[in-house]
Image (tube, rainbow, N blue to C red):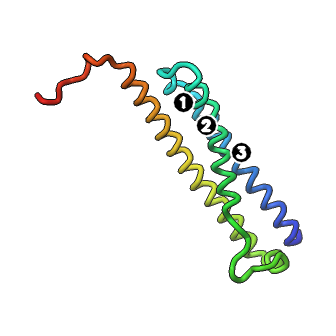
Amino acid sequence: MTNETYLVVSYFSSASIGALIALVTASELARPARQALAGLAGPLARMFRRALPVWLVLAVLLAFLSVTYFDCAHTTYEQIVADRDHLAATARRQGSHMAWYLAVGLLAYGLVLAGALLVKARQARPHGDRQDSSR
């Protein structure tokens, strides 16, 4: 396999594998997210359910695109294609960035979801049920 073919194959494989992992993660978390959203009714819950796969795929693709092949030693396309070790290192760096962004995306989604559920719980609680903190 030539270096140019390796570049194209590794580039598109990394993006595809990252998006697939994001979709599998979203499908694994669909049921727990649905159970967590049972307290929210209407369009807000539907929006959160539908946003999870899109959110994760966008996070992975953003991470994928954040890695560049250019650096101090490789300033032209010919230099990049000529260095197979650089191509492999960049592919590994893309994988690492995608995993990191996926984790951050999951954390951010969880925090937003927790915030929405907390606001909903506070709205649903009658004012008389608040405990007196001065005791």
Disc ID at residue 20: 3
User: Which sits in the foreground, 40 or 2?
Assistant: 40
Nearer-N-terminus badge (1/2): 1
Picture quadrant of residue 68: bottom right
Q: Mark 3 touching mark 1, by CB under 8 A?
A: no
Q: Secondary structure at mark 3?
A: helix
As drawn, the residue found furthest toward the left would be 135
What amino acid is at disc 2?
Leu
Image location of residue 49, percent across then percent down: 60, 30
Q: Mark 1 touching mark 2, by CB under 8 A?
A: yes
Q: Is residue 130 above or below residue 99?
A: above
Image location of residue 31, percent across then percent down: 57, 27
Mark 1 vs mark 2: give the one in front: 2
Badge 1 crowding class, 10 Å Cα cut-off, few under 14, some 14 to 19, many 20 or more, is: some
Mark 3 vs mark 2: give the one in front: 2
Q: CA distance from mark 3 to mark 1?
A: 19 Å
x 68%, y 40%: residue = 23
What amino acid is at disc 1?
Ala
Determine which residue is flagged by label 1.
33
Q: CA distance from mark 3 to mark 2?
A: 14 Å
x 56%, y 47%: residue = 105
Q: Is residue 77 above or below residue 44?
A: below
Left or right: residue 9 compared with residue 132: right
Determine which residue is flagged by label 2.
52
Q: Is residue 112 above or below residue 16?
A: above
Q: In the rendered image, which quarter contains the C terminus? A: top left
As drawn, the residue found furthest toward the front would be 127
Image location of residue 33, percent across then percent down: 54, 30
